[in-house]
């Protein structure tokens, strides 16, 4: 079984943390939402490290104060619950040891606390005190930066997940007179795969739920686990699961894009292992010509779920924390691989109203790095309408496998679009009628053609008749398409696209 994120395999957090504790680091930063798992890791790492040195392990919180946690020495020392008091105490103590501070991040805004932490770090040679800061988010002030080693707690590895599942099964048996629950081996191995990307506590909860549900681990548990996983990974709300994928059979035109995707399917699904997997495409084009539809169809061609990422939501909801939330969303997408990640309106990566543009430049930088380094089976379909707002970096070679231009549909495509949208609504038209109608809608987008069909149905309903080719023709003639109303803009877009993109049709 292979992990989606190859780099995650290389790391063993226990070994890394043990090495950090042994290598005389005065300050270790553990940024994670999984406090319990971090504490457990730290407990084990400090046991490993302490074999060589006689260190105590202490834990501080603002609610409880200071407490020794490797040995029971009675209750906590509450008199040092105040952060500054505590640091004074730490600075004065002759006791070498590992001091774990939970959620200390708000107090790093105080220069007195920063200075005292720096004093403790600089005094490491005299008293070996390693301070470990555990918080969900930690930005260190510059004064402390070079004393600190950072450890990112990746989601549990396959081995850790296996341990979680084994423990949950054993606990279940223990609470059922020692009778082990039936475990379908194939389902168990898929379960271990599906749990990738979830925190240890979420893995544990889902496995326990699966067992509680029917007293067994079977393939029937898998869809429920996948659904729960989508829910869990969509915590920041910028990534949404799009249940509807599309088929190219429901799209008029876009033939070249369709062939391109079909040719890459074996590389994406791994059936042609010697071919490099495709990373993604950028779809630029005229509004309403089917870019969103094509993103959905890409998921349909590859037969995987579609996730949609929305930059506008990122900036609206996560003002000030957009970069971290982008990283979280991308790592959630990676955890949900194989999937298609549709980045809608990618031009919004450069947010308007962002002062000097500093934040959105950094956000864009994070996205570009991820695009370049992404090794997981996440195929990106980015869509954009407004080339003027499109950051030049996105168009550079190598970011996307291909940049497609989705233009206004040609005569054949218009005929197909008419056939698709009349057919969907039970309106039967002969090929020659479709061909005649297609001549009435030159310069129309697919969306505008669809709208004319919809409007013809209203007109037919109002007059008590059935929809005819004449009624549709009348609606088409009455429509002023965007490409005519904004002829200059559309002409500029097409001009621009000519040398820079490949036609999707
Ligand atoms: P925008 O840039 O405004 O988001 P878009 O290029 O993403 O537009 P879609 O949202 O895909 O366009 O199109 C809107 C609707 O118009 C589609 O849901 C579909 O019903 C219809 N449509 C557009 N283009 C086509 C097409 N080529 N074939 C069939 N239907 C189409």
Image: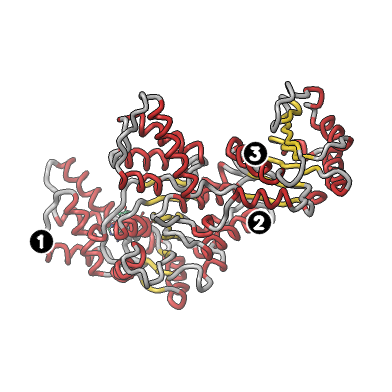
Identify the residue position indicated by label 3 in the image: 43
Q: Position of residue 50 (x, y in %)?
A: 72, 43
Ligand 1 lies under 8 Å from the Cβ of mark 1: no
Identify the residue position indicated by label 2 in the image: 357
Identify the residue position indicated by label 1 in the image: 430
Q: How many numbered tags mark residues here? A: 3
Mark 3–mark 2 Cα distance, whole angstroms, equals 43 Å
Tell me where residue 476 sits by quadrant: bottom left
Q: Residue at x 40, y 59 (%)?
A: 287
Mark 1–mark 2 Cα distance, whole angstroms, equals 54 Å
Q: What element carries label 2?
A: loop
Q: Which residue is drawn at 45% across and 56% down?
A: 4
Front of the two marks 3 and 1: 3
Position of residue 85 relative to residue 393, above or below, is: above
Front of the two marks 1 and 2: 2
**Is 267 positioned to the left or the right of 335 in the image?**
left
Q: Position of residue 131 (x, y in %)?
A: 76, 42
């Amino acid at each position: 079984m292979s992990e989606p994120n190859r780099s995650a395999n290389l790391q063993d957090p226990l070994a890394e943390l043990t090495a950090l504790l042994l290598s005389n680091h005065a300050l270790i930063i553990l940024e994670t939402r999984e406090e319990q798992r971090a504490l457990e890791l730290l407990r084990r790492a400090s046991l490993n490290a302490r074999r060589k040195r006689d260190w105590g392990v202490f834990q501080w919180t603002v609610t409880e104060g200071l407490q020794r946690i490797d040995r029971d020495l009675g209750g906590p020392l509450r008199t040092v619950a105040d952060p500054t008091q505590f640091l004074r105490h730490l600075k004065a103590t002759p006791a070498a040891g590992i001091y774990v501070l939970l959620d200390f991040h708000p107090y790093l805004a105080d220069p007195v606390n920063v200075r005292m932490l720096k004093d403790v770090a600089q005094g490491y040679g005299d008293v070996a005190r390693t301070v470990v800061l555990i918080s969900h988010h930690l930005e260190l002030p510059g004064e402390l930066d070079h004393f600190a080693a950072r450890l990112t707690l990746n989601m549990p590895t396959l081995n850790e997940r296996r341990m979680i599942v084994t423990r949950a099964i054993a606990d279940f048996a223990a609470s059922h007179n020692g009778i082990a629950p039936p475990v379908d081996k194939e389902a168990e191995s898929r379960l271990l795969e599906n749990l990738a990307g979830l925190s240890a506590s979420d893995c544990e909860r889902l496995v326990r739920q699966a067992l509680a549900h029917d007293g067994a681990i079977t393939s029937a548990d898998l869809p429920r686990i996948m659904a729960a996983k989508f829910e869990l990974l969509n915590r920041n709300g910028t990534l949404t699961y799009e249940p509807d994928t599309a088929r190219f059979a429901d799209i008029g035109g876009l033939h070249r894009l369709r062939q391109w995707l079909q040719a890459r399917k074996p590389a994406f699904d791994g059936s042609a292992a010697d071919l490099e997997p495709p990373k993604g495409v950028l779809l630029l084009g005229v509004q309403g010509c089917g870019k969103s539809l094509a993103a959905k169809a890409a998921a349909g061609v590859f037969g995987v779920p579609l996730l949609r990422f929305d930059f506008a939501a990122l900036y609206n909801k996560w003002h000030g924390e957009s970069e971290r939330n982008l990283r979280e969303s991308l790592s959630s997408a990676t955890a949900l691989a194989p999937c298609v990640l549709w980045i809608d309106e990618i031009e919004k990566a450069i947010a308007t109203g962002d002062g000097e543009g500093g934040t959105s430049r950094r956000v864009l930088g994070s996205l570009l790095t991820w695009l370049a380094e992404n090794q997981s089976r996440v195929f990106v379909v980015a869509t954009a309408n407004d080339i003027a707002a499109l950051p030049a970096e996105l168009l550079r070679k190598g970011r996307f496998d291909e940049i497609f231009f989705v233009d206004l549909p040609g005569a054949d495509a218009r005929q197909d679009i008419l056939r698709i949208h009349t057919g969907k609504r039970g309106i039967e038209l002969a090929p020659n009628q479709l061909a005649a109608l297609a001549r009435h809608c030159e310069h129309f987008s697919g969306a505008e053609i669809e709208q004319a069909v919809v409007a013809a149905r209203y007109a037919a309903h109002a007059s008590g008749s059935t929809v005819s080719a004449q009624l549709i023709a009348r609606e088409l003639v009455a429509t002023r398409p965007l490409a005519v109303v904004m002829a200059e803009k559309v002409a500029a877009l097409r001009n621009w696209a000519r040398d820079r993109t490949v036609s999707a049709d």
